[in-house]
Structure formats: C-alpha cells, structure tokens
Image (tube, grey):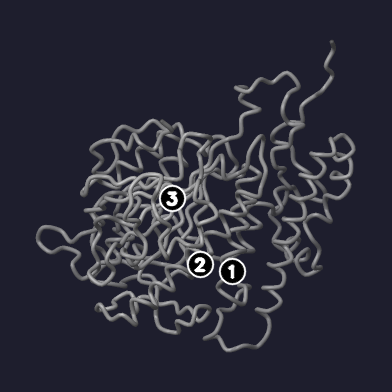
Amino acid sequence: MMIFKKAIPRRKFLKGVGATLALPLLDGMIPALAGPTDAVAKPVQRMGVVYAPNGIIPTKWRPTIEGPSFEITPIMEPLAPFREHLLVLSGLDQKHADPGPFGEGGGAPHSLTGGAYLTGVFPKQSEGLNIRAGVSMDQIAAKELGKQTQLASLELGLDPVEASGYCEGGYSCTYLNTISWRTPTTPMPMEDRPRAIFERLFGDSETTNPAERLARIEENRSLLDFVTEDTASLAKGLTSADRNKLNEYLDAVRDVERRIQLAEQQASREIPTLERPAGGFPASYEEYAKLMFDLQVLAYQTDMTRIITFMLAHERSGRSYREVDVPDSHHGVSHHRNDPINIEKLVRINTYHVKLFSYYVERLRATKEGNGSLLDHTMILYGSGINNSNEHTHDNLPTLLVGAAGGKIKGGRHLRNPLGTPMANLYVSMLNIMGVAVEKFGDCNGKLELLSVA
C-alpha cells in the first residue's frame, strides 16, 4: 500500500500584507506513518503559574480529607467540574518569605512574599537599582523550553506597575509588581495591556514601522483580513476535522481582537478615571481577566510559548471587587483581625478569583489537541504566597496543580505533605516533569514523587 499523505510543517504560518498568524496543531501536521511516540505526533507540554495575592482563607480552602475522597471546599467550588484534574497540595512552606533572623524585612511582608514565591530565596532589601532575589522557577523552565518557541515566556498581570522606588519597609516596588525573575537581579515586568500582548503574539513580524501598525488598528481591520487568501489556500488541502479545528481557532482569534478593539473604543470615552484606568482596558475586571486568559490559551495553542506566569493582581493589591459586593480594599480586608464580616468578604474575593481561573481551565479543556485537550498537556500552578493573611504566615501555603502534564500528573487527589516541606521541592518536581533537569533549587531538600501517576 502506498501512502501519499504529506504532513503540514508544524511551524506553518498564514501570511498576508506583512501580517503573520501561527497555526495550532492540526492532524495534518502529523506524518502519515507517525507512531504514538513520534516527536511530531506527540503534543508538547506546557507550564503556567496563576498567582492570587494577599493570601487565601485556609479553613475555606484546604480539604480535611486526604487522597481521592477529598471534599471540594467553598473557595474551590468553581473548580468542582474539573475535580479529576485537580491535585491539591498542603504542607508546603516558603520560609524565605519570613523575616530574617535579625528582623530583616519585618516591615515588608508582601515584598518578601512576592520576591520569594517562585525563587525560594530571601529578597535583598533595597529601594534602588541594586535589587536582588533569585532566578524564578518559571524562568529556569523558559531558558530551556524557550529554545523551541518564538517567545521564551510570557509574564502577564491585571494591575498596572506600581510607582518605582520605595513601596514597603525599605523594599523596592519591584518585589510587589512581579514574581518572575530572569536572573537574580533582573525581574520580569508583568504586561497588563491586552493589545501589546496580542501584537506580541500575532502582530507584524515583517515590519517594525509603528505607523503601519497604527494605520491597521485605525482601519479597525482584523489581522485575519490580511491572511484570508493564505487561509483559503490552506483550507483546500485539509480534512473536514482540521477545517473545523482551524475555523474554531480563527473564530477565537477574531473574538479576542474584537474585544480588544471594543476596550480601546471604550477607553476613548470620557469616564471617571477612578472607575477604570485609561489605555484600552476592558470595562470590568471580569472581562479583563477572561480576555487575558483567552490570550494565554491562544499562546499555548499556537506553541508561541510554553511558559506563562500570570498575576491576578499585585501582592498587597488594594483593588476592590464590586463584582462580588466587596467595595473595600482587598489588602485591607485581608487583615481581617478575625472579624467574621471581613473574613466573609475575603472568602468572596478568594472564590471570585477561583471562579475566573475556572474559566481558564474550561477553555483549556475545550481546546482540542491531538488525542486530548490543552488541559491534558498542560500543568498550571494556582496559589498564593501567604497562608494566614492576618499574620502574613508562609507555612502550609494554598497550592493547587491543575492539568495532566501529558499524563505525568494524576489528578483527583489531595496530597498532604509533612509540615515544613519546602515549596522548592514542588518546583523541582514540576521542572523535572517538564524535562528540565534540576536537582537543587532554593531550599529544596527532595522531590514530591507522588506527583507522578502510580
């Protein structure tokens, strides 16, 4: 028997008038004779971090039952439909976010939290340029996996960058603005502008002329308008399944563009600056978060990057959440002083964040890839760097892994680690799962072997 099927290149792009658009993995990109272990046929693995600031109420987050029979707690309720994809981890500490032996950093609990969360080192006190933490776990992965993608990583957030200089207890605002560090002295800025992220993923790659890019935006034309001819040519040679997959992907790109354009149009209106920052941001926090999550799905789907770090807000964020009837400052409410009213408000904020995260998980699960979905081939860490927000404790941190990482993680369980187990143990295990060989990181003293499928 003769087989004439010719695989489409995995790095196929649609092109037109200086615009390029990456494609997701299509069945036609898999060679006709590829076996189940073929490198092209096997979907890639991805890793993400979604960070929730200011702590999570422990009693409403952490299950009391260990193993597969764990209960879905009130804050995790929005993730109930994804129970089989959840790996709840307890007992993990980040001791380097605690004040030093002589009280260093005692007046900057949130700066220590942000600086230490993914690095596993004690941040240096500095208000100027000589800031220092450590290389963060996500950037260790990006250094290796970024060799195979156009973008080594994406660092995104839903808060604008705080003022430079001093923010808390003699510590630079940088420690609040990011949790990602490329080198011990090079923090990665969190991009909060949807348009900038979209153009980084799908913008002009054959011209750097800002006037041309601005003209395209002003014409209110979609990126897809420029690649129509190439799209039609490619579609002729696809199977019906691949055509459906391509159409779903292009519809998602167009929808994201439409929402960004709408946000930009809204930003041009005269509105009170206290209600919404200018500059093309969606009108509500929920719309904003969902748009940013959708951009992450597209980034993974097209294999533009395999590493994404996302902050739902900065550490010590004072954002209010009127969407869930909490007009108070998030940071203020987190210092609840054991007041039941404030605790209930913080639970509402915590649950709202998880609800938004569940939207992301659903989008990953609904996006088909190979014989599974993006969720099957992705590992997302969701958590906070503070346990008891009233006292700024960093023991037994709220930690959750979502996704199967290509079958390397068995979900549907609550794993209770011995109290005092370093978060760095989890990070080393996650990096190893991603194929990044790391034996030592931060204060790591072992690995969490139970991450793997038994």
Which residue does the numbered mark 1 point to in the structure image? 288
Which residue does the numbered mark 2 point to in the structure image? 158
The residue at the point 62 percent across, 63 percent down is 291
User: x and y percent of residue 87 in the render?
Assistant: 42, 47
The residue at the point 54 percent across, 84 percent down is 275
Disc 2 to disc 3, C-alpha distance: 17 Å
Disc 1 to disc 2, C-alpha distance: 8 Å
User: x and y percent of residue 367 in the render?
Assistant: 66, 47
Residue 64 vs residue 175, the one in the foreground = 64
Name which quarter of the figure residue 116 lies in.
bottom left
Q: Are marks 1 and 2 in contact (CB under 8 Å)?
A: yes
- Left or right of residue 312: residue 201: right
Disc 1 to disc 3, C-alpha distance: 21 Å
Q: Which quadrant of the rendered structure holds the C terminus?
A: top left
Callout 1 secondary element: helix
Name which quarter of the figure residue 210 lies in.
bottom right
| Above or below: residue 374 compared with residue 289 | above
Callout 2 secondary element: loop
- The numbered mark, 1 or 3, whose residue comes first in the sequence reads 1
The residue at the point 52 percent across, 39 percent down is 146
The residue at the point 34 percent across, 34 percent down is 449
Find the residue positioned furthest to the front: 69
User: x and y percent of residue 289 in the render?
Assistant: 56, 66
Residue 416 vs residue 2, the one in the foreground = 416
Which residue does the numbered mark 3 point to in the structure image? 381
| Above or below: residue 343 compared with residue 211 | below
**What amino acid type should be assigned to the residue bearing mark 1?**
Tyr
Q: Which quadrant of the rendered structure holds the N terminus?
A: top right
**What amino acid type should be assigned to the residue bearing mark 3?**
Leu
Label 3 packing within 10 angstroms: few (<14), some (14-19), many (20+): some
**What amino acid type should be assigned to the residue bearing mark 2?**
Leu
